[in-house]
Image (cartoon, rainbow, N blue to C red):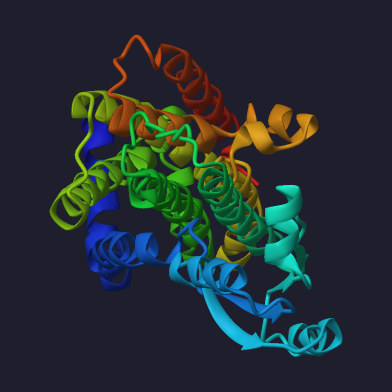
Amino acid sequence: MRTLKFLLEKEFLQIFRNKTILRLVFFMPVFQLLVLPWAATFEQKNILLSIIDNDHSSASRELIQKVISSGYFKLANYSSSYSDALKIVEKNEADLILEIPHNFENTFIREKSTDVMLSVNAINGQKAGLGSSYLGQILAAYNRELVSQSQGSGQIIVKPYYMYNTEMNYRNFMVPGILVMLLSIIGGALSSLNIVKEKEAGTIEQINVTPIPKYIFIIGKLIPFWVMGMFILTVGMLIAWLVYGLVPAGHALIIYIFCFFYLIAFTGFGLIISNFSSTQQQAMFVLFFIIIIFFLLGGLYTPISSMPRWAQIVTMFNPVRYFIEVMRLVYMKGSTLADISHQLYIIIIFAVVLNVGAIVSYKKTN
């Protein structure tokens, strides 16, 4: 234990002497939690819409008014023909074209149904999908309204109730995920640079000639970043509460328990990269290559259930996935320790395997 104490003193001294890392540790969670939730939104607004109104009736004008007033669309222009509207799309001045046919109102009154044409610029798949979905919902609601007026009958109004996120506020969904991203960067990036930095400075040779056991050396490297990660988690949760009014529906202690093992696992992962790297640049490239895959396949932006089967299998080996799941379950659903036991057991296995890997891969002789 005395050896470990000296190692920890050395590691903390190195960290506190590096002013850049200290600024990064304090600045990163504040900046990312204050800025990213406002920018990383799943909502699509200001979708540019070109309209071709061939009917010029009261019904077509009312339909256009409903679409524009929905808040999702911004009128790009009124086009006189489809070819003119297409030119607007080709110039990237419109994302969707809504064409209302001739005799739109008369056809609907006579036949109780009519068609409108919707053309979507699908270069941005998410924007195209959500834009067409929004427009489809508005048209369906307007259709029901017209049917009700023409028949003079009542209508069934469906009022959905969204459980665990009643206001469908995307920040409730994104902020816990961004917090996991921050902890992964701290745990992985800083630890991946640690040993390789000593290799470049030559100080690793001095440690290698000492009788310090490899596991004590790895534990000494692991603890400082684990402490920093827990500190950042606390700062992040405070920012989430003060800025977004977001507090865990479950017990905050569950998050700390899970984070305890997650940081051990991810720090071990960073130390493995550091052991195999010769320079800090090499370590950073390897880390960012892997960590981007972790984030994209972690369910932060894309639901895992929407991924193809092979990608869902890959996510089972991604520790980020389990922490994001736990954060959202505790924050939004109020899950208990028993509810997240499956994820907890898996992250403990990750912690053991990755840190054993860090100890084994650390060579005291080259």
Question: In the drawing, does residue 66 fall left or right of residue 316?
Answer: left
Residue in front for this viewpoint, 250 or 65:
65
- Dividing the picture into quadrants, the one containing residue 69 is bottom left
| Residue lying at 56% horizontally and 74% vertically, measured from the top left | 61
Quadrant into which the N terminus falls:
top left
Residue 6 spot, x, y in % from top left: 23, 42
Q: Position of residue 357 (x, y in %)?
A: 58, 30
Specify the farthest residue to the left. Answer: 242
Dividing the picture into quadrants, the one containing residue 289 is: bottom right
Residue 212 visible here: no
Q: Residue at x 75, y 55 (%)?
A: 114
| Residue 177 vs residue 232, the one in the foreground | 177
Pick out the residue farthest to the right: 83
The image shows residue 92, relative to residue 70, as above or below, that is below
Image position of 331 with respect to 174: above or below: above
Viewer-side residue, 126 vs 146: 146
Q: Is residue 311 visible?
A: yes
Residue 156 position, x and y percent, is 47, 32
**Residue 38 location, x and y as percent?**
36, 65
Q: Taking 57 as reference, is 194 above or below it?
A: above
